[in-house]
Amino acid sequence: MRKKKEVEELISSFGKPKNQSFPFHMIERYFRNKDNSKAFQVLSDKTCNDLDFEELFMFTDRTSSKPGQQYLYNRLRTISPEKRNNDPEERIIQRFTADTDFRIRIQKLLSKLDKYEAYYISSLFQEEHIKRPGWYFIVPLLSFTNVLLLLMLWITSQAFFVLLAVYIVNFGIHLWNKKNLNVYLDSMPELLRLKFIADKLYREEALLQEINPGLPDSVKVIGQVGKRMAFFQMEAKIQSELSGLFYLVSELIKIMFLLEPLMLFGVLKRMDTRRAEIENVFSFVGHIDMLCSIASLRKGLDTYCLPVIGKSDCTIKANKIYHPLVFDCVPNNIEVKGKSILLTGSNMSGKTSFIRTVGVNMITGLTINTCFAESLTIPLARIHSAIRISDDLMNDKSYYFEEVQTIKDMILNSVNGSRNLFFLDEIYKGTNTVERISAGKAVLSYLAGNGNIVFVSTHDMELTDLLSDEYDLYHFSEQVDEKNVDFDYKLKKGKLKNRNAIRILQINGYPEHIINEATLLSERLVSYKPSYHV
């Protein structure tokens, strides 16, 4: 009955987001420690915050194991040069989607690594191990001494007093080593389980072997130290399940011969030279779990596509693109070729959400080869953003200064020799109107050079005139009647022509005197047409 229920849950959950907690400090552990220096781009924390990356990950993650979850997180944060619609990835995803029995067999294996302790496996090949202390050489000597003293008890009873003295010393070393042992009681038993599951997955299907044909060599290497690691598996079981006399006897034996420090540092020495092989096995299991997760993600979407990724072309062409985290999101079409995009519109009309929509689709398209659109063509580009900026009171930075620093980083990246995609929301809104427009125009012109693409929103209509040669103009608008403001969230060509901010104040019951004065001043300002000489 339990097995039947497990299968039913796997069938019913396929295509649905997880309903569980997400301890991101553990999920991102593998990513934080991994050397991704050869990647095309590693998404910055700033960009991830701007594009609601954690929420995107929670929606995307359908993995069955903790290593798979960590592997997926790293993939979503890391853009690599190759296209993601490569074999065998897409063939495996299609197999997971079409063959339910195959997928369930794989998920049942992967779920054996779903315990919280499995998060610590990556520490075994990414983090420094505990080093032997300088006096460690006495440990094997004391262990061998007790073996001799036990034999000498048959010859002389006086050996007992020496044995007792040595045992007291061993007891102190045993207690000292307990804290070292506890560091690995979670990870080493899970590593053995990882090795077992990787071997099972490799033998399950020839298609999975294409991910890493050389995996058996790595599994074999881990198996060479597996017997010693089995000691930690037994120790964890003793501490969690057994008690009383058996535990006491086992402790007395381990103290007598200093088994724990001998086993621990012996295993660590061997593992220190096997880091690449352990990561190889970890990546194999995580990779398969990630592909199953992508299959589940696509299954649950009404609309998705595989992107066309151009390495030399600078075109973005989206047909019915939408944001997966926005309920009942209105899809939009856009084509970007040769120019950047300047968006205008009132608050809540959809400007920033659309910018995030493009950003999110760029991330998922370049990492997991899945986009939320009917069709999408995107360039291989580095992604940078300045959307969510706030005062940094702890470091005594004002909003404007924080924005200045963020955009300076963009300026430096704009000439890095690669194509870049910049997302900005209301540039320099932390300063006065004249300097905001002046600096904004200069910066946006600079960022749009060198083959880069910029998506920027603004309330400053003056920028639409100043940038019309370099940017294509789009806008979002709303319908305002006597009592309501109705947003359609449809992207429209050209700049915004209607001004409804004061009308919205009126609908919300502002005093008539304020409305009249504001309307009069607005008409005067609009009628004033300064000359721009740039």
Image: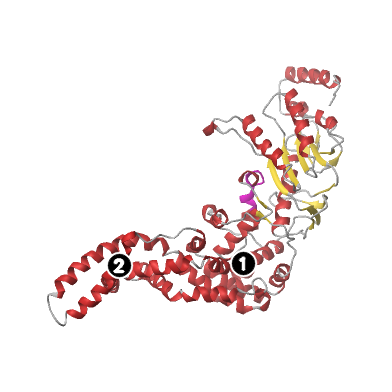
Give the residue pinned by disc 2: 139
What label does residue 289 carry, if any?
A: 1
Lateral position of residue 95 relative to residue 340, left or right: left
Label 1 to label 2: alpha-carbon separation:
43 Å
Q: Are marks 1 and 2 in contact (CB under 8 Å)?
A: no
Q: Is residue 190 left or right of residue 357?
A: left
- Asked if one can make out residue 21 in the rendered structure from this viewpoint, the answer is no
Callout 2: few (<14), some (14-19), or many (20+) C-alpha neighbours within 10 Å? Answer: some
Residue at image position (25%, 62%) is 172
Q: Position of residue 135 (x, y in %)?
A: 31, 61
Seen from the viewer's position, the closer of residues 7 and 248 is 248
Q: Amino acid at mark 2?
A: Val
Say whether residue 13 is left or right of residue 335.
Answer: left
Give the overall secondary structure of the magenta segment. helix
Q: Nearer the viewer, mark 1 or mark 2?
A: 2
Q: Residues within 10 Å of mark 1 (few under 14, many from 20)?
A: many
Quarter of the image where the C terminus is located = top right
**Quarter where residue 168 is shown:** bottom left
**Which sits in the foreground, 305 or 283?**
283
Task: Pinpoint residue 272: horizontal percent, then vertical percent.
Answer: 47, 65
Q: Amino acid at mark 1?
A: Asp
1 or 2: tag closer to the N-terminus: 2
Quadrant for residue 495, please give it: top right
Q: Nearer the viewer, residue 323 or 261?
A: 261
The magenta region covers 48-56
Image: 459 above or below 24: above
Q: Could you tell me residue 395's position as x and y percent?
A: 53, 33
